[in-house]
Image (tube, rainbow, N blue to C red):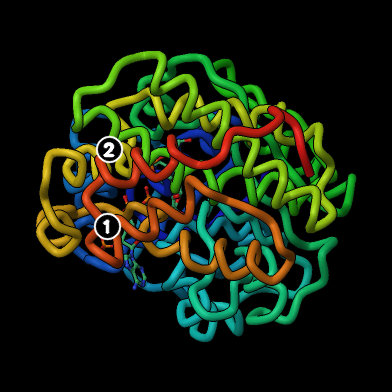
Amino acid sequence: MRRAAVLTAGSWGTVFAKVLADAGARVTLFARDRAIADAINGRHVNPRYLADVRLPDLVRATSSPERALREADLVVLAVPSQALRSCLVEWAPLVGPGAVYVSLMKGMEAGSSRRMSEVIAQAAGVGPERIAVVSGPNLAREIAVEHPAATVVASASAATAHAVQAACWTPYLRPYTNADVLGCELGGAVKNVIALAAGMLEGMGFGTNSLASLITRGLAETARLGTALGADPMTFAGLAGLGDLVATCGSPLSRNRSFGEKLGRGMTLDQVLAEQRQVAEGVRSCRPLLALADGLGVSMPITRQVERVLYEGLPPLEAVKDLMSREPGPEYHL
Ligand SMILES: NC(=O)C1=CN([C@@H]2O[C@H](COP(=O)(O)OP(=O)(O)OC[C@H]3O[C@@H](n4cnc5c(N)ncnc54)[C@H](OP(=O)(O)O)[C@@H]3O)[C@@H](O)[C@H]2O)C=CC1
Ligand SMILES: O=C(CO)COP(=O)(O)O
């Protein structure tokens, strides 16, 4: 039986702990807040993030990272992307020598523009064969109630990808493997920025044509950046690209989309941040993505406008006008 540690007990970490247990693993879920760990052990629910779903008996919780990581052969990481590096300073020394790290995160590190697997490799000092990424159209709330969905397990090592695939295959979650770690992570990070824009459209009252145009052109700029960085273009037509983009831009369950919707209704960044409890990764990831794009001379007009709305106070309607008034060009260009 596999032994998995999941850090931490937020929305996706909690649901993924259920997935792993339903697939047969013994799971220890780390919660910073001892009250959450006690509720999971006593009542099998996470009162802060998933109060109405019973977690399997194979999920136990602890507020001690040492206890969570002891004997774990899978170390599953689900913290806000900007917190990962500092968390690993504390956690990595507690991880056993052969354990595989699994990233569930969909963001880019501010300042370094590093993907989460790159932060893991650097901060934990592990090689790519010990790292996997799980990414796809996986809104936590829907997976929690076992609506069927698919996902991608990406790793540079086929053996690692297959092991993680087996560890998270349940009747309601179907994992596919992919060797393109870069493309899968980029798809997950950029779709959060595009989902902010999708929410803004919703908040401004625009309809389905606007949303479909945004999703399609959002995918175009994701693929442009990805291929310039060396990703496989096919990845962006897959679950971690188009799949996740459609799910996140279309669902009111998405935190990025709801964040954008509030901006679209006229709230400022600070006002939305003050009332948003869960992480909306696109807010902090758009600048590191633009830094990568600028370094390669890649155009990402939607991401650029989202950044201007967030950090320059540009009204969302002005951002739409700017996008629409650019010189028209061919649909496909590099
Ligand atoms: N939710 C979803 O549907 C999906 C999310 N993801 C990705 O998973 C990652 C985690 O998201 P999600 O679980 O939804 O986020 P949540 O906001 O729901 O939970 C965040 C978790 O991280 C903890 N945390 C917050 N700040 C820190 C910190 N500075 N140091 C250590 N722990 C911290 C929180 O603990 P506390 O409660 O104590 O504050 C909480 O357990 C993100 O990258 C997201 O994009 C991917 C697929 C689906
Ligand atoms: O990544 C997700 C679905 O695949 C969740 O998106 P949000 O972080 O916007 O809720």
Task: Say which quarter of the image contains residue 36.
Answer: bottom left
Q: Which residue is mark 2?
A: 200
Q: Is residue 128 left or right of residue 320?
A: right
Tag 2, which secondary structure?
helix
Q: Is residue 241 visible?
A: yes
Q: Of 148 and 311, which appears nearest the observer?
A: 311
Where in the figure is residue 46, as x and y percent of width and height?
Answer: 24, 44
Query: Which sits earlier in the primary sequence, circle 2 or circle 1?
Result: 1
Q: Is residue 272 left or right of residue 330?
A: left
Where in the figure is residue 97, as x and y percent of width and height?
Answer: 76, 75
Image quadrant containing the C terminus: top right
Q: Amino acid at mark 2?
A: Met
Q: Is residue 27 left or right of residue 93?
A: left
Rendered residue at 43%/32% (across/down): 248
CA gap between label 2 and label 1 equals 36 Å
Ligand 1 rendered quadrant: bottom left
Q: Is residue 298 above or below residue 235?
A: below
Where in the figure is residue 246, as x and y percent of width and height?
Answer: 50, 24
Instruction: Count residues near mark 2 (Cα–Cα under 10 Å), then give few for <14, some for 14-19, many for 20+.
Output: many
Image quadrant containing the N terminus: top right
Rendered residue at 76%/51% (across/down): 181
Does the beta carbon at disc 2 come under 8 Å from ligand 2?
no
Q: Is residue 17 visible?
A: no
Tag 1, which secondary structure?
helix
Q: Is residue 160 above or below residue 250?
A: below
Q: Amino acid at mark 1?
A: Ala
Rendered residue at 72%/60% (across/down): 100
Instruction: Count residues near mark 1 (Cα–Cα under 10 Å), then give few for <14, some for 14-19, many for 20+.
Output: many
Q: Which residue is mark 1?
A: 37
Does the beta carbon at disc 1 come under 8 Å from ligand 1?
no
Q: Is residue 46 above or below residue 69?
A: above
Q: Disc 2 or disc 1, which is closer to the eye?
A: 2
